[in-house]
Image (cartoon, rainbow, N blue to C red):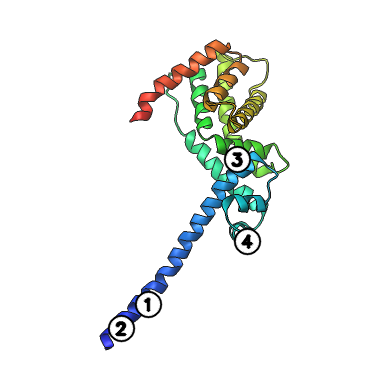
Amino acid sequence: MLTVRKTTESSSSARVAAAPSVQRSDARSNRARILHVAQGVLADNPDATINDVAAAAGVVRRTVYAHFASREALIDGIAREAAEGISAALTRIPAADESAVTVFVRQTLALARVGDQYRLLLAVARSDLGHNSIHDLLTPMRESAAAVIRRGQREGVFSSYLAAEVLILNIEAIALSILDATNAGLIGDPAGAATTSSLVLLGIEPGDAERIVADVRSSDVPARSH
């Protein structure tokens, strides 16, 4: 009987010890789900409330507040996660012999592949929620793209009618409108549309822009298949 009692006590202790681990796992899962849902909700409507996010996530408002003390904290959380996703998409180092046009196309296509996250940052940055931390997250991406555009301007392949920093803001506006149109079912290839439109803005003829995007995509297919 003593052996049985000890075995029972050991099993009970194991269950008690496992409970906090399960709870932590559930908490992480809930937080990740809230962040994922909030990305889409706030990208569609930067004025969305905590109630809107909770309803879309299928949880009560109290659950959202358990993970994020305020709406601003929620926005910071999803913005940082979005920035991490975008940074991961842009980690590819260009080859030494790649032209400025090719580098720009690959960067823009990469951003389009994380469209919801990119759209979220741009939408929030353009709203009254665009506090300094959001702009700080966008700065490295803008600087990287501006450097490529300046290089293209020096090489004579991109127009110089506007400074690279201004062109980047125009390109962001194009990307945001195309991603919105995609969500409305008006565009089936947001990556191609955003990249081609951006090249046209930079002074490349529409037909040439379409061909360049198609060529870069074609050359990247073998690399993605391995």
User: Observer-nearest residue: 57 or 170?
Assistant: 57
Residue at (56, 23) in percent of width and height: 193
Please report whichever mark, 1 or 4, sits nearer to the chain's N-terminal start. Answer: 1
- N-terminal-most mark, 3 or 1: 1
Determine which residue is flagged by label 1.
12
Q: Which residue is mark 2?
A: 6
Q: Which amino acid, mark 2?
A: Lys
The correct choice, above or below, for 29 with respect to 109 in the image is below
Task: Write down the residue under mark 4.
Answer: 62
Task: Decide: few, some or many residues near mark 2? Use Cα within 10 Å; few <14, some 14-19, many ≥20.
Answer: few
Q: Is residue 191 above or below residue 33?
A: above
* First in residue order: circle 4 vs circle 3: 4
The tag earlier along the polypeptide, 3 or 2, is: 2
Helix, strand, or loop for circle 1? helix
Please, what secondary structure does the residue beneath circle 3 have? helix
185 lies left or right of 129: left
| Amino acid, disc 1 | Ser
Label 3 vs label 1: CA separation? Answer: 48 Å
